[in-house]
């Protein structure tokens, strides 16, 4: 029985056997439903749920049935499909005649009590009809009285009409490997920007159970075929292929920085020349740096989903750079080791920072290669990355200790204490001994002589909400700027003229900001101060003479031998900035 229930509870059916009125089955959960928990199949003998006969529920129309009825239907030779009522249509079959009259009709659900007043007589209480698109309700008799008026019978899709993918825009086609294609019908004006259908990508593992909750909410209020659970690359490829020809499509990525980077990279590769549907973000991760930068919020709060849905159509399209890292192995340079030994003799209490000595630690074993080769926010090397890497390695080994945002914070503080010596005796070591920094073919190693972290920034956001480059970004909404760089006393060595030769930060200018942080600045950036600006350039080469931890868009990894990292510009993507918060 269990097997049967699982094979039918995968959400939207995209197979060849899908019908326009197919349901979107998910396991039944009493917490997510206020409806009765009885099977709706008209031939059912015992309509209750038992362990042998579990119930499943359609996330769109909230219908509940026993999972077994679906396998009975599949095996049955008769075409008796009326045993289970149909769902709200989600697409049209190409072979059905293009009948304009069947479009934009209310889709009624029968309810025992109207929860909102009848649209016609303004009274509540007795049973009636509720439209599953626009949420309008009528008493059955009231509807009978007015339904022949054409204006009344037409559904306007309610509050979210501008972002809903209407069933008649999505067709089954034979000439695509994905079986479906979305397109606006001829009668919709090509310049009509009031319609901005939104495609959702949801990481179901993000934010505890939040991903699941958001999925259930979206497939109920929108067309379930515009909502995708992210499973693998082909989920994204299929969705982008189906919706590539739909005019004015927008995208919303629900997840953390990793998820956002994953989908954005697909957009860069699929749509050259900034032709991609612009993407917004619903932040479900822990850092959410890009979401902060684009003003979609720093953490998901309940109720935020509906607000975000109404903000997406009014958000401002803007260009975001993508950067590629290419890692090559370096021949070990013995002269570097000599300089290290000399350096060591002066400060016997700290030989080398711990993260340099840790080359063969088994705890880093699973973190030797970055998950992907692109970043949209930042990459950093040195002490900051070491703390993040230890935190991630610990979380991989011992996930039970990392179950809430507060516990995560406490564990982060615990991991950073391991580097007490490196923080306290920062004067005894610096990154210049281990890193050679080349910005646009110019050797800038001298500028990191007093630094303990090296940071390359694309956007202004780094490490969950800090802005270490400082100053106003071209991409900033005016109310967003809080900057103490004028009273920053940690930059006495940088003259006013060198500060001024930098341009305002812009995440679409094909330049990356390079800056250094000493241990003091690593603390001060959290209260609005900035780091030491080094360069704004088009390519960076970083040669590591020793093993080194790195931190890229929320993911940390350990480069266990001498390597060179070449960082180059790798395309651009249209994203949406939410100016209406
Ligand atoms: Zn049943
Ligand atoms: Zn349904
Ligand atoms: Zn309606
Ligand atoms: Zn009424």
Image (spheres, rainbow, N blue to C red):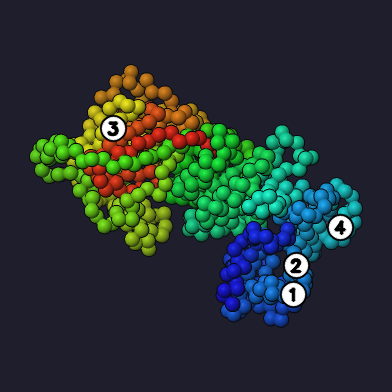
Sequence-first tag of 4 and 3: 4
Q: Mark 1 points at which residue?
A: 77
Is disc 4 in contact with disc 3, using a CB cutoff of under 8 Å?
no
**Camera-nearest residue between 55 and 95:** 95
Q: How far apart are marks 1 and 4 (CA)?
A: 41 Å
Name the secondary structure under disc 3: strand
Sequence-first tag of 3 and 1: 1
In this rendering, is residue 95 above or below 319? Answer: below
Disc 4 versus disc 3: nearer the observer: 3
Sequence-first tag of 3 and 2: 2
Is disc 2 in contact with disc 1, using a CB cutoff of under 8 Å?
no
Q: In this view, does 343 lie to the left or right of 328?
A: left
Q: Mark 3 points at which residue?
A: 437
Q: Name the residue under label 4.
A: 142
Name the secondary structure under disc 4: helix
Neighbour class for label 1 at 10 Å: few (<14), some, many (≥20)?
few
Queried on whether the Cβ of the residue with tag 4 lies below 8 angstroms from ligand 4, the answer reads yes
Q: Name the residue under label 2.
A: 85
In this rendering, is residue 35 above or below 553? Answer: below
Neighbour class for label 2 at 10 Å: few (<14), some, many (≥20)?
some
Quadrant assignment for the C terminus = top right
């Amino acid at each position: 029985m269990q097997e049967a229930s699982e094979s039918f509870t995968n959400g939207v059916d995209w197979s060849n056997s899908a019908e326009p009125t197919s349901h979107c089955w998910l396991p039944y959960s009493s917490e997510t439903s206020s409806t009765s928990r009885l099977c709706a199949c008209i031939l059912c003998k015992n309509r209750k749920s038992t362990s042998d006969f579990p119930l499943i529920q359609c996330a769109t129309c909230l219908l509940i049935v026993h999972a077994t009825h679906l396998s009975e239907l599949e095996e049955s030779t008769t075409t008796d499909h009326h045993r289970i009522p149909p769902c709200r249509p989600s697409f049209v079959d190409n072979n059905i005649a293009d009948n304009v009259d069947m479009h934009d009709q209310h889709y009624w659900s029968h309810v025992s009590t109207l929860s909102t007043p009848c649209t016609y007589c303004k009274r509540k209480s007795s049973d009636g009809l509720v439209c599953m698109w626009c949420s309008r309700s009528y008493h059955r008799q009231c509807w009978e009285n007015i339904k022949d008026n054409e204006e009344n019978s037409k559904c306007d899709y309610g509050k979210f009409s501008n972002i809903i993918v209407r069933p008649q825009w999505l067709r089954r086609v034979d000439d695509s490997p994905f079986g479906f294609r979305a397109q606006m019908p001829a009668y919709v004006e090509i310049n009509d920007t009031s319609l901005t259908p939104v495609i959702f990508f949801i990481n179901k593992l993000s934010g505890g159970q939040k991903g699941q909750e958001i999925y259930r909410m979206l497939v109920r209020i929108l067309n379930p075929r515009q909502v995708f659970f992210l499973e693998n690359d082909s989920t994204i490829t299929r969705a982008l292929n189906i919706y590539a020809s739909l005019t004015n499509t927008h995208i919303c990525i629900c997840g953390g920085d990793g998820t956002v980077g994953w989908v954005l990279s697909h957009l860069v590769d699929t749509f050259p020349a900034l032709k991609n549907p612009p993407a917004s973000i619903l932040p479900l991760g822990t850092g959410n740096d890009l979401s902060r930068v684009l003003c979609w919020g720093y953490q998901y709060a309940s109720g935020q989903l509906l607000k975000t849905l109404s903000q997406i159509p009014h958000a401002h399209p803007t260009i975001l750079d993508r950067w590629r890292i290419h890692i090559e192995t370096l021949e070990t340079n013995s002269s570097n080791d000599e300089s290290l030994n000399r350096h060591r003799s002066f400060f016997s209490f700290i030989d080398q920072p711990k993260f340099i000595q840790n080359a063969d630690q088994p705890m880093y074993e699973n973190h030797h290669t970055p998950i992907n080769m692109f970043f949209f926010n930042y990459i950093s090397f040195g002490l900051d990355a070491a703390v993040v890497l230890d935190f991630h390695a610990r979380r991989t080994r011992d996930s039970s200790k990392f179950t809430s945002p507060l516990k995560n914070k406490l564990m982060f503080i615990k991991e950073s204490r391991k580097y007490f010596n490196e923080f306290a005796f920062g004067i005894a070591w610096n990154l210049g001994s281990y890193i050679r920094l080349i910005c646009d073919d110019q050797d800038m190693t001298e500028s990191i002589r007093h630094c303990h972290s090296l940071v390359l920034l694309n956007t202004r956001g780094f490490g969950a909400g800090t802005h270490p480059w400082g100053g106003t970004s071209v991409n900033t909404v005016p109310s967003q700027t809080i900057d103490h760089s004028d009273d920053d006393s940690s930059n006495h060595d940088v003259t006013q003229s060198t500060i001024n030769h930098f341009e305002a930060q812009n995440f679409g200018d094909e330049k990356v900001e390079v800056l250094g942080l000493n241990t003091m600045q690593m603390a001060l950036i959290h209260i609005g101060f900035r780091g030491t600006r080094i360069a704004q350039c088009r390519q960076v080469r970083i040669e590591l003479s020793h093993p080194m931890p790195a931190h890229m868009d929320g993911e940390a990894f350990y480069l266990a031998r001498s390597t060179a990292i070449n960082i180059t510009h790798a395309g651009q993507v249209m994203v949406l900035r939410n100016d209406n918060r």
